[in-house]
Amino acid sequence: MILKELGKEVDLIIPDFPETYKYLPSCEEAKKECEKDRVYDLAIALDCGDIKRLDDRNNNYDIAKVTINVDHHSSNSMFADYNFVDPVAPACAQIVTSICEQLGRDINKDVGTCLLTGILTDTGGLRYEGVTSETFEFVADILKRGVKISKVYKQAFAAISRNKFEVKKIAMNRLEFLEDRKD
């Protein structure tokens, strides 16, 4: 949405878009793949520590004129022409929020909903160790845009795909207590 505001033609490629995130603004624009052999001027990978995780079926990322990688994993392989990797950031969406601010772009409610979803899901609902006071400042700023954290939290975490449910069911059925009532 931000790139479109800047007048760019954008293709959002997500080969396996999870049903859980169908509430996100503009999600209907996501494509499963690019046109075969289409050469993009710029390709941006988000929250991807290794090029193998891109699931780039038509190799469009590799043949783009310029590539950018925005990520927060310390294990990032620095596979792009330009790598913006902040291993201290608890969520890639927090980095993207900073980039939007640096570009002087306004984070509206729709963009904020996407960014808040990214922050919440990447931090386990703000529970992981890497969460900082700065993370809460980013979240607070997004909430000022009219985004409701309780609504996003419910949509991002309450719904579970059938596949995930089946995996959890199998795992729960295989759990055993080895020592009675001992922690």
Image (cartoon, rainbow, N blue to C red):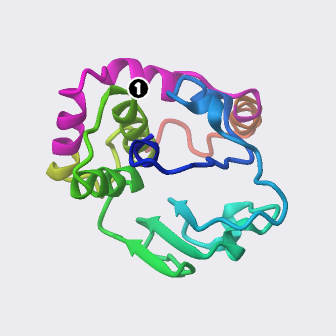
The spot of residue 108 in percent (x, y) is 30, 31
The spot of residue 84 in percent (x, y) is 39, 72
Q: Is residue 2 visible?
A: yes
Q: Residue at x 74, y 60 (%)?
A: 55
Q: Could you tell whether 127 is left or right of 16 in the image?
A: left
The spot of residue 66 in percent (x, y) is 56, 75
**Quadrant of the rendering where the N terminus is positioned:** top left
Nearer-the-camera pick, 23 or 49: 23
Q: Residue at x 84, y 60 (%)?
A: 36
Nearer-the-camera pick, 179 or 45: 45
Q: Is residue 157 visible?
A: no
Magenta residues, dominant SS class:
helix
The spot of residue 96 in percent (x, y) is 36, 54
Q: Residue at x 54, y 30 (%)?
A: 26
Determine whether 169 is above or below 11 in the image. Answer: above
Magenta-drawn segment = 136-164
Q: Could you tell whether 55 is left or right of 180 in the image?
A: right
Query: Which residue is labeled 1 in the image?
Result: 153
